[in-house]
Amino acid sequence: MKKLIIPSVVVFCLVIIFSCKEKSADETVVKKEAVPLENVITVLPDSTGYKVFESNCRICHSLRYIQMQPNFSRKNWEKIVDKMRKNFGAPIDSINAKIVVDYLCKIKGQVATH
Ligand code: HEC
């Protein structure tokens, strides 16, 4: 009889440990659904350069990031596009980067005051 006590205690502990583990794993399951970028609606003007802008600037985030910005000077837009390329690795060559900056200045630019 004594011989049976130790194995049954071990089995009992294992059952408790495994049932606890399963429970906590269940509780931590969080359902996340990504919103496809093309479903994020933006209302930016379709003027010259829009296609280049859209195809290059919607790779990592929605165009709402741009829509949310205030009007900036050319220098500021250049800095932002530069940051996307150099810091975040946006694959845009310098010719397209200029087209994008021109477009951004047109739709969200500042009139030079000097
Ligand atoms: C390689 C990925 C990538 C591409 C491509 C990209 N961005 Fe971004 N962009 C980011 C990341 C990452 C952030 C968030 C930065 C943060 O939270 O500070 C961001 C943020 C922004 C912001 C928010 C303000 C800021 O300065 O952080 C603007 C505006 C923006 N991007 C504009 C653009 C434009 C314009 C283009 C196209 C030329 C572009 N992005 C392409 C990665 C990218």
Image (tube, grey):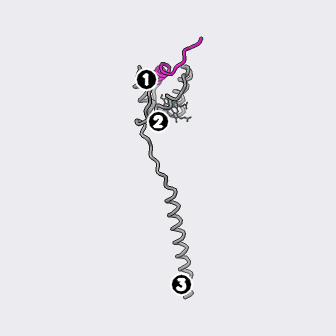
Image location of residue 38, percent across then percent down = 40, 35
Q: CA distance from mark 3 to mark 1?
A: 80 Å
Q: Residue at x 41, y 36 (%)?
A: 39
Amino acid at circle 2: Cys
Q: Between 104 and 3, which is closer to the camera in this rendering? A: 104
Label 3 close to label 2 by CB (< 8 Å): no
Relative placement, left or right, of 77 versus 50 is right
Task: State which mark lies toward you, 3 or 1.
Answer: 1
Whether residue 6 appears in magenta in the rendering, the answer is no
Instruction: Provide the residue designation for mark 2.
Output: 60
Q: Nearer the viewer, mark 1 or mark 2?
A: 1
Position of residue 4 relative to residue 90, above or below, is: below
Q: Residue furthest right?
A: 114
How many labels were placed on the picture?
Answer: 3
Q: Residue at x 51, y 27 (%)?
A: 81
Q: Position of residue 46 (x, y in %)?
A: 40, 23
| Percent x, y of residue 29 | 49, 55
- Which residue in the protein does label 3 denote? 4
**Main secondary structure along the magenta-highlighted residues:** helix
- Which element is circle 1 on? loop
The quarter of the displayed image where residue 76 is located:
top right
Range of the magenta residues?
Answer: 94-114
